[in-house]
Image: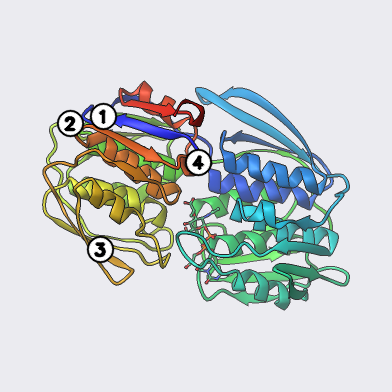
Amino acid sequence: MDKIKIRGGRQLFGKVYISGAKNTALPIICASLLTDEPVTIKNIPFLSDITSLNNLLLQIGTKIDVKEEELNGHKTQTITYHTPEPSSLIAPYDYVRKMRASYYVLGPLLAKYRHVELSLPGGCAIGARPMDIHLTSLEQMGAHIEIKNGYVVADIDGRLKGAHVAFHSASVGATCNILMAATLAEGTTVIENAAKEPEIADLIDLLNKMGAKIEGANTSTLTITGVEKLHGMTHEIINDRIEAGSYAIAAAITKGRLELVNANAEHLKTPLDILRKMGVKIETTDNSIIVDAQNCTLHGEDVFTDYYPGFPTDLQAQFMALMCVSQGAAMITENIWENRFMHVPELMRMGANINVHGHASAIVRGVEKLSAAPVMSTDLRASFALILAGLVAEGETIVNRVYHLDRGYEHLEEKFKAVGADIERIKESDW
Ligand code: EPZ
């Protein structure tokens, strides 16, 4: 496993090109299974989660053609997915345990091929991560579902039937799965309390271009009129709001100035408002965000995570790192995941002053400075929080278990080096 070494104390200046959104790419790649025609997706980020999902699709029988191309000022991948006839309708444990989002094959394979066997992903570091909404909704649409030997085995006779489904939580994953399944169902499906994240709107855009009939994008009620067949097309995915938010915090914590190119400020309203309240200057254009924290004194602000457009849980750990070196106290409340404070003990090893109350709230009292330490990544976003802490800590921080970062942050060291960070990857072979 590689490590990342950071020598803290440098302000960051320059441009960071924001990549295509991981959490959009994953469902959209699986949506290609809904048609036997080729689907071309542009702006796919270079991430290990994409490689893992591609490997799963290869074993399902999808033909994958990858082209690298320059898009919006930086190198991206354009990938064509073509599944004329699947050779397997099974998503095995070894794939799903590596990448939970493999469960996005459930809706498309069931709707198009009437059978699917999906290993249950199980919990992970941030929580139990149940799938009850996905499964009960598919049952309401006429699927027969059994859990056998750790697998969801789902079948339908004929086509799925349109149904009125009401989610008990506005789940992103369930919204994507049921949306995809409903496109090929007989009749109309209405999803109540659907997730409203921008990633969902992008999936709806893609599905409608494929011939689906979906109304209600960006609202919590989605109406899908089923069609018999979808077709291929080309789609460019949106950029990653969480990556943009993470680099915005990097500018703030180092008291630097970064221009986040290809970032959509509309998708980051709540986190950018918090940064402004903390004292950071922010300007936005149609496709960029300029974050300027030079000569700013940062003050802690309370944050509570919520469904979109609320504050994203995927930026909670990074904001906590920022609060650690801001003046005053800030309360951070995690409302989405039951175990998403794993970064707290690591930040405390670097000198942070954090008190966790129960499993949902933490009070962070700002300290003058952090000191470098060897630390351990526990999940993707926690890992970025440790990088942020390392950027301002005195001395040399070593972040272990870097594979978490490689799942969701494209070309991380290159992007940081280009704006002045003293950061390098130590390959496992060089330890
Ligand atoms: C997506 O996960 C993201 N992953 C997560 O990002 C993100 O943290 C999460 O949405 C919330 O925004 C991807 O898009 C691949 P959910 P997902 O279903 O879809 C409960 C990252 O760092 N729930 O919206 O798995 C669940 O327990 C990752 O990039 C049920 O109760 O999350 C949670 O409390 C981590 N039953 C809430 O809903 C269900 O059947 C939201 O979960 C499904 C979910």
- Kindly indicate whether the residue at mark 2 contacts the one at mark 4 (C-beta within 8 angstroms): no
Q: Is residue 12 visible?
A: yes
Residue type for callout 4: Tyr
Q: Which residue is mark 4?
A: 403
Check the image and report above or below for 170 versus 249.
Answer: below
Mark 2 Cβ and ligand 1 under 8 Å apart: no
Q: Which residue is mark 1?
A: 257
- Kindly indicate whether the residue at mark 3 contacts the one at mark 4 (C-beta within 8 angstroms): no
State the mark number for residue 362.
Answer: 3
Residue type for callout 1: Arg
The structure residue drawn at horizontal position 88% and vertical position 69%, both measured from the top left corner, is: 158
Q: Real-space Cα distance between discs 3 and 1?
A: 29 Å
In this view, the residue farthest toward the front is 431
Is residue 399 toward the left or the right of residue 55 in the image? left
Which of the 4 quarters of the picture holds residue 164? bottom right
Q: Real-space Cα distance between discs 2 and 1?
A: 7 Å
Q: Real-space Cα distance between discs 3 and 2?
A: 28 Å
Check the image and report above or below for 67 versus 98.
Answer: above
- Kindly indicate whether the residue at mark 4 contacts the one at mark 1 (C-beta within 8 angstroms): no
Q: Which residue is mark 2?
A: 294
- Kindly indicate whether the residue at mark 1 contacts the one at mark 2 (C-beta within 8 angstroms): yes
The structure residue drawn at horizontal position 82% and vertical position 58%, both measured from the top left corner, is: 112
Within 10 angstroms of label 1, few (less than 14), some, or many (20 or more) residues?
Answer: many
Within 10 angstroms of label 4, few (less than 14), some, or many (20 or more) residues?
Answer: some
Q: Nearer the viewer, residue 171 or 237?
A: 171
Question: Residue 169 appears at what percent x and percent y?
Answer: 50, 71
Front position among marks 4 and 3: 4
